[in-house]
Amino acid sequence: MTSQAHNQLAVVATAPPQSSMPSIGSLVRRPEVGSLIGMIAVLVFFSIFGGANFMSAGGAASWLNVASELGIIALPIGLLMIAGHLDLSVGSMVPASSMTIAILSGHYDLPIIVGILAALGLGLAVGFINGVLVIRTKVPSFVVTLATLFALAGLTLGLSVILSGSTSVALKSGPTAKLLFGDYLGGKFEVTLFWWIAAILIVGFILNFSRFGNWILAMGGDAVSARNAGIPTDRLTIALFMSSGLCASFVGMSQAILYNSAQVAAGQSFIFNSIIAVVIGGVLLTGGYGSVVGIVLGTLTFAIVNQGIFYTGFDANWASLIIGVLLLAAVLMNDTFRTLALTYAPRAKSRAR
Amino acid sequence: MTTPLLRLTGINKSFGPIDVLHDISLEVNRGEVLCLLGDNGAGKSTLIKILSGVHKPTSGTMEMDGKSVAFDSPRDASDHGIATVHQFGGTFPLMSIGRSFFVGAEPTRRWGPLTIYDRKRANEIAVTEMRQLGITRIDDGDRLVGGLSGGERQALAIARAVHFGASVLILDEPTAALGVKEAAHVLRIVLQARRRGIAVIFITHNVVHALTVGDHFAVLIRGAKAADFRKGEKSREAITDLMAGGEQMAELEAEIERFSAADVG
């Protein structure tokens, strides 16, 4: 028996089981298959019913712009959900950040860089507070961030009225800031698209190629075991909340620069839209499972449905119905593929015994 | 006489006014399996938690290799070479075999200016270590832990402990949730760990499993050590009676017989 086992070892050592071509079986076991099928389905649906306009550069820009803003927020939200947490406060973080930059650099005429840094700093600070509250109080992050969502919304409204006397503030930014954060390329594509791509690469690296990715997965799978294995779960939780605060404030800041103004009430839609995008992308709401490719596909799917409806002859009010049905279908499909991923059949029949 | 690897002397534990463990003294030697037997609520879990650093004893001392130790955390205990494997083995069913094997101790390699997780090496080591424990079905470290059978998950957890140099392996009812064949497999892995010189503490209430692998037995009843004996000193019936509290078990059996007699009549 032992010598047999050692022979097998030798086989493994000389011929590692990794093959360069993934088989169909291994593809089906990837967490993002369900979301890929979903995205292709809505893309086909809207290219049929949306006509040529939907597939034109302008049409693509309309949903890619929505996807890039949502995507920048959905990525850290996805990481948080994989780690077993939620962050609802992004809904207030976006307008809070917009108002910060608009009041500082618009109302008070400070240099734009001051506004940008203050807005991003606010995002990090709110994320830090969320993280500390979650680990200190042990209250579920849903409740903690629901509280900060409302607290921050109230704070933004109150301070905006006191400082600027208005709930809407204009912002004039210079060409550099415009080019970096709030411009259209070719008159159609927002530059945030590039920031989204950068965020995808960074978050993809973190989740798949760094040790932190393993820590995030482990923490979402079982926080107690993860801590016992030596993972600094408290620091990791705070860092994840700070990243979602930072990304939400980035989107708020770039929106203010893009639209040359900021409103107190903008941004609440990001709360559920980011969760929908992440869940369609195959991330498990209870944590421990998910992928960056899935989150990106989920974001694109959401954006296609949200914008594609305008290219069809249908009333735009139906978009929410489609998203609701799609969400449920995606979750059921993801469950199916997750079950498949949990079945183990040895790769080669000859090795099985 | 060599010093035992792990020695507990006069361990007491109380949670507020409730005494859970009274005056427990135990010795575990290298390359030996100590079976900790006891019915539900006998204090087995509390004792494991003290050994694995979750709880601190109210009084009493722990020594490793003759040196006094006190564990501040589970991490501290595992740094001292004490590894605990729970009933369901791997606790991360949705992580890959390679990733969960190395949780918290991931191998890394350089990739340009960046340090990245070495997935290939992690998978290879995890698969190799499992194969050394006789789990030959597993050939892909990317597969999810949740796809393994109960016995394979136990093997993964034990392989992990062995790989990271555990000198004391605590197995908390590893066979309780398993079928006959799987349980036999886990018992064989326990013996393999023993052959490598690891001190194994095997917690169970299955007397047959205990007698198969144990060198040394301790029976806990209501938080106190009721018996401490070596292999061959007591029969299976005697141990079962001890675990259930002796006379009470005999009474219970008599009662069951009366009931079944009444049913027949």
Image: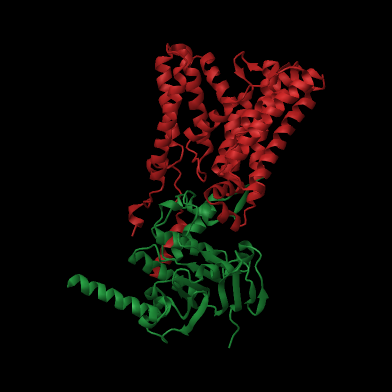
Chain colours: A red, B green
**Residue A24 falls left or right of residue A184:** left
Let me know if residue B106 appears in the view.
Answer: no
Position of A285 relative to B100 (above/below): above
Q: In x, y percent, where is residue A120? A: 72, 31
Identified at 52% across, 44% down, the residue is A287
Residue that extends furthest to the bottom in the rendered view of this protein: B1
Q: Quadrant of residue A130?
A: top right
Q: In x, y percent, where is residue A176? A: 75, 20
Q: In x, y percent, where is residue A337? A: 40, 40
**Residue A103 falls left or right of residue A48:** right
Position of A311 relative to A229 (above/below): above
Nearest the camera: B147 or A309?
A: A309
In which quadrant will I find the C terminus of chain A? bottom left
Total numbered circles? 0
Q: Quadrant of residue B212?
A: bottom left
Position of B49 relative to A186 (above/below): below
In which quadrant will I find the N terminus of chain A? bottom left
Q: In x, y percent, where is residue A349? A: 33, 53
Let me know if residue B179 appears in the view.
Answer: yes
Nearest the camera: B203 or A73?
A: B203
**Residue A269 falls left or right of residue B257:** right
Nearest the camera: B108 or A59?
A: A59
